[in-house]
Each structure stands twice: as structure tokens, then as C-alpha cells.
Image: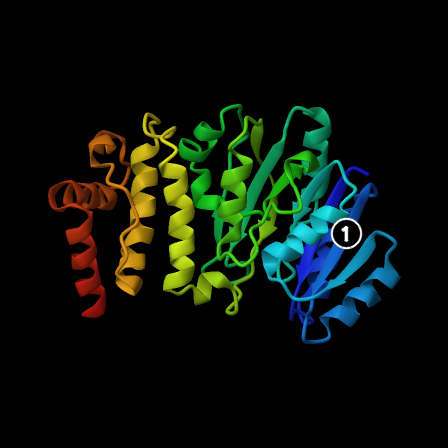
Amino acid sequence: MRLSVVIPVYDVEHTLERCVESVLSQDVDDMEVILVDDGSPDGSGALCDQLARKSPQVTVIHKENGGLGDARNAGIERAKGDYVTFVDSDDVLAPGTLTAILTALVSHPEYDILEYDTLLHFHTDRQQAIELKDHVYTDSADYWCTGEAYRHSFACNKVFRRELLGSQTFPKGRAFEDIWALKDILKTHHTIATTEKGFYCYYDNPKGITHKADGQALTSLLEAHVEVLTQGILITRKGFSEYYLHVLNIQLDVYRLTGRILLPDYNDHIKLAYIKSGANKIKAIMLKTLGIRILCRIHKIIRHSR
């Protein structure tokens, strides 16, 4: 079996068929589609069984509700493919995506992870493409920092060699579990490639964590980034300054919502010459001048006054 596609299912009876059809229509024979019914309270579980009866490529797991990460882990345990990818049940794949991805993997068996392009806010007036160039990284720190993987640390626009994944890849009960999983996968040496072929299409989900993230959820996201930062391997990278300011934005919101400051002070390692945008340069100068705590207080006052 070449590829296993894991689709967690929870309360999505109105979008599930669209999602599964976009995967099955990829015209990939050597593929299994694993639907993980995570104790769905609506008719999604029955729809999973109906879709499995229609296609021999589809299998179903019914389990008690454990959250998105737990559902993905259940799919990983069942997976038989050489490679595993994830699709959320309210999203779709653009036509021809998996064919192009598998062709690349056959041509380059050294790839451990292959990441492809993403369309955010799909089918809205805010639709935005994250377009990647064809590139190969043999240093995961270079991929994370210089390649700005932290800006698109989704699980769903990547294909993983199955050996990289285990039954506890995604932490159960953690918000923003994608980044927690990816940062741990990247701790060991891997060959990561990006390609401009294919598109993962993200529909906006008003029930999703991005829309509903509170102080606790954003704290989980910040903690994952802080764990990456404190490993110390990124400090000398050219992209470190941009990455640190990216994490600073999360810290500002965490302080506004919880009053907590978790981000270590790496002021001495921020290089203004490496910062691309004018807005970020101003923020970096304010950080260097005022420090994290005062900058957090100012941000909170400004946000509360709006």
C-alpha cells in the first residue's frame, strides 16, 4: 500500500461526502482512506459506513470522542501505507494533488516529509494561497526557520513517511496539536521537501480552534513555540528574528487574555537587518527599547481601548 489518508470525523455530516469525494477522485489506486468517527453526535458515523459500502478503498473506525489529535492517532495505528497524510473532514483536495505528490515521492524515495501548497479561506473573498517553491531541506532547523515552516505548520498539507508517526504523535487534549506534533517529528534528522504541485483547500470553520481560540488555547500554541525556541538551535539562523517576532505576536495575545508572559528574552539575538517588513522592524525596536513586559502592557491597553 502506497498511501493512507486519515480523515477524522466529528459533527460534519454536511461536508464529509464532499471531502471524501475530493480524495477518492484523485485517481490513486494504491491508496486507502481511513474515516475515524470520533464519537460524532450527528449522522456522520452512519454516513461513514455508507461511504465505505460505496468504495472498497474506504474503511471506518468508530471510537469514543477523544478530540482531533486522538482521532488522527487512531488512524495512524490502522494505517497500512508507506506514507500517511491527513485531511480534515470539512476540507478538500484540489484535483490531481495526490497523483502529483505520489509521483514526486516515487522519484525521490529519500523524502521523509513532502509539503505542498495551501489555499486558506477557500471559496471566500478572503481566499489566500500559501505557495511553496520546490526545495529540499536536509536540516530541519533550516526548514523551520529559514523556510518559515512555522507559518504553515499544518498537518494536513503534508505527506509523512509512516515510520515517523506513532500512536501518540498528536497530543490528546492539546489545542493546536499540529504544531506540537510537527516540532517533535522534526527533532530527529529528516529530509523534508516542499513542492508547488497540488493544493490543500481549507474551508473556514466557525467551530474550529482558529476561530474559537481563547487564552488557554493560545497559551498551548505559545508553549509549543517556546519549547522550540529554548532548544537554542535556531538562534544563529538568518530567519530567527522573523520567527521570534512571529512568536511575540502570540505572546502579546496570551498576555492580553491571561496576564502570563512565557516568551524568553532573546533581544540580543534579534537582527534588524534580517527583518523584512517595516511594521516588524518597528515592533523589534520597541521590544529592544521597552522589553517584553512593557510591550505586552501597551498592547493590552491599546486592544482594550478599541
Few, some or many residues within 10 Å of mark 1 (<14, 14–19, 20+): many
Q: Is residue 80 above or below residue 89?
A: above
Residue 174 drawn at (x, y percent): 50, 56
Residue 181 drawn at (x, y percent): 54, 45
What's the residue at 69%, 76% (across, down)? 42
Is any part of residue 306 visible from this angle?
no
Q: Nearer the viewer, residue 97 or 292?
A: 292
Is any part of residue 19 visible from this angle?
yes
Q: Nearer the viewer, residue 166 or 204?
A: 166
Number of labelled discs? 1
What's the residue at 52%, 64% (across, down)? 208
Instruction: Determine the image quadrant of residue 53.
Output: bottom right
What's the residue at 83%, 67% (across, down)? 50
Quarter holding the N terminus is: top right
What's the residue at 74%, 58% (across, down)? 35
Q: Is residue 253 rendered to the left or right of residue 181? A: left
- Which residue carries the number 1 mark? 33
Q: What's under tag 1, amino acid-wise?
A: Val
Q: Tag 1, which secondary structure?
A: strand
